[in-house]
Structures are given as C-alpha cells and as structure tokens.
Image: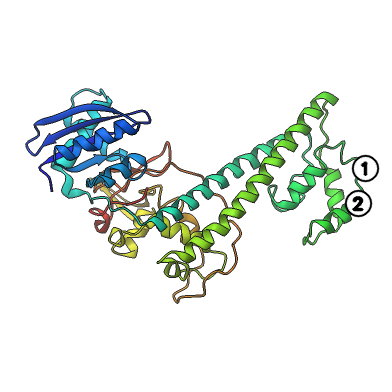
Amino acid sequence: MGSSYAGVDWASEKHDVLVADETGEKLLAATFAHDEQGLRSLCGQLVRLGVGLVAIERPDGLLVERLLDAGLRVLALHPNQVAAARPRFRASGGKSDRFDAFVLCELARTDHHRFRVLEPDCDETKALRALTRGREDLVGMRTALTNQLRAELERFWPGPLGLFTDLNSRISLAFLERYPSPADARGLGAQRLQGFLRRQGYTGRKQPAQLLAKLRRAAEGRVGETELGAHRQLVLGLVATLTTLGGQIKTLDRQIASAVRAHPDGEIFTSLFRGPDSVICAATLLSEIGDCRARYLTGDALAGDAGQAAIAIESGKRKAAAFAGPATSGCAPRSAPWLTAPATGTPGPKTATPPPEPAATTTSARSAPSAAPGAASSGAVGKTASRMTPPATADCNSTSP
C-alpha cells in the first residue's frame, strides 16, 4: 500500500481532492472538473503521488469506476460517517467541499482499519443491478402516476375507482381508455360491458350488472363542459403513460429473469425462494449483496444490515430493544420483498417464465455502505436512524449501495 492517502468530495460538475502523507502533511489540494480531461488528470495525480487509499462518499458511479480502473484502492464511506467525523476537526459548524475532502482524507489515513476496501463486482452482477434498480425506479414512477390518476378521478368521476382490483391493471386502464369520463360512459349498458369484459379476459366473480350498478352508485361531479374536457384529457394522458410503463416493466421482468439465470450464482439465489414468481426478489438480493461474500459472515449480519434484527439500546437507566432502520438503502427497502417472500430450505427449480411484478416500494436514495460501530446510518432520503452495526459487518463495507 502507498504511503499517502486521498479524500475526494465528489459532485456533479467538479471534485475536490486532498492528498496527505502518512504524517498528515498536505501533498495536494486541488479541484478537478467532471469531464474526461479532469478525471484523467485526477487519476493521474493520485497515481503519481503514490496514493494507497482513496476515501469517497459513494460506492459506485463513473468516478469510482475510473479510480478502480486506475488501480487505486477505494474506501466507500457512508455520508453519515463523514458527518459524524466533522466535529473532530472543527469548532464551528462550517462546511465546505474542500473541508469534506480533508475529513475524508483523514478518515482514510487514521481510521482505514475500520473500513473495508471496496471490491468491484463482476460485469454480470453490475448488469443485473442496473436492471433491478431501473425496474424499481419504473415501479415507483408507476405508483406515483397511479396515485395521480386516482386523485384526478376523485375530482370529477370516482365511479371507476374500485371497479377492478387495481387501478393500474390492464383491464382498468383499458376501461378508462374507452370511458375516460362520465359522458363517455353514459350509454354503457350491461350487454356492452359484458362484451368489454370478455375481450379483456375478465376473471372476476362479479357479473356485468353488478359492476355497472357499482359504477352508477358513485357520486356525480358537477363540472362544466370545458372542465370536463380538461379532466378527460388528463385521464387519457395518464392512462397512456401507465400503459407504456407497464409494458416496459414487463420487458425488464423478462430481461431480469434471463440475466439471473445466466449469472454464475443465479441458481443459488433462485433456489432460496419457493414461489416460481420470486425471480425478481432473487435477482434483487443477488445484485445488492454483490460478489463480496465476506460482506455478511452470518445470516444475522445480513438481517441486521437490512434493519430486520432487533438491537439493544442502553444508556444509564434506560434499556430498550427496537428494530433499527436499514443500514444501507441497497439492502432495504429493496430487502422487503425477499425478506417476506416464501423461502425454501432446499434448492428448487429455476424460474421458467417471467414473474409478475411484486408490490412497489418506496424508492430510496442509493447510498454508500453501512456505518461503522456507533455511527449513525441513513436508510431513506430524509430519514436517519441510529444503529449499531453488527460485529460481523463492522469491517466489511458494501460493494454496492
């Protein structure tokens, strides 16, 4: 390992870098632009100065890939770890990018034994992670648009709400595309509705007359013709967007199913679930754990990092036990589907058909690895939970957020 250390405070347009030797003497303090010339110069300077460790507040991304490609060893620190360390080096509450680079450099120099060096994943794992995270983002968008569509219908025509199981289901969207307003559904009768249900492959137990009665029982809005036309266009636009999103999610489902079966560890992870429709859960679990098998030495360590293990809180006379928030957003809330999915103790057959998508979960920010013992850690955007990292994970940081 080299005799100097670097801290990189990354940003979208520039990166502040500070390099110090093993005694803390500053060797370089500079700012590099986030372009090809800037990144090439940044990596070249670090290599020339013999930097042994580079501390940065993220475990992935273009900058991290370039650092690894240059042969540099990277410590991916959680932002809360850096925030907790700032008071060690200042008396006031000031903050700057150059100061954060200094804090990162000092953590790499004095506390590197507390963190695990980032181990890059194989190309198959990175590809699978990109697919599962992209799918999760689309599911989040679909959830938001569905809520917007529901709110729009409540404003002038609540009748279609609850007519079918899910508002974003194929049959619900087809119904709203054909009847986007009460004026369009004015001539809808039981016979015409029966034909619509037959064409859509309706498998519900309610008869057309029952569905029609439910539609008619809904409260009627009092809107003018111009306003009704505006609401109608909004409904059609949201329906068209949701239909496109649904098609893209199904395409990603097929791609993920194919990718996880082709992954070297795919058979191991798919065998953890009993249901044939759990391939998305298996793929998410595989992609977020990554290739570093030393990251979680025991199952309890994995559960603790995902916020599924109870922790003891003792301070003076206060003693309590509670569930801490997730240590890394990469493991939860993404962990929610697979931690509650039916598991099996024996390997099962691989999934042969693309699965339906599981219920959407709130999308959280992708953050750096879990915090060191005693440090605060963040689970989702805007939420911070104090937790103690399990001993098995204290020295093994995530290779993926």
Tell me which residue sits at (65%, 50%) in the image.
Answer: 247
- Image quadrant assignment for residue 178: top right
The residue positioned 16% from the left and 34% from the top of the image is 19
Count of numbered marks: 2
Residue denoted by label 1: 187
* Residue 227 position by quadrant: top right
Residue 338 x, y percent position in the rendering? 48, 60
Q: Is 216 situated above or below 254?
A: above
Identify residue for label 2: 192
Circle 2: element type: helix
The answer to whether the residues at label 1 and label 2 have Cβ atoms under 8 Å apart is yes
Q: From the viewer's perspective, is residue 86 above or below residue 147?
A: above
- Quick check: 147 left or right of 212? left
Number of other residues with Cα within 10 Å of mark 1, as a class: few under 14, some 14 to 19, many 20 or more: few
Q: Nearer the viewer, residue 57 or 194?
A: 57
Asked if residue 273 can be seen in this view, the reply is: yes
Secondary structure at badge 1 equals loop
| Horizontal side, residue 278 vs residue 8: left or right | right
Q: Looking at the image, which is closer to me, 308 or 228?
A: 228
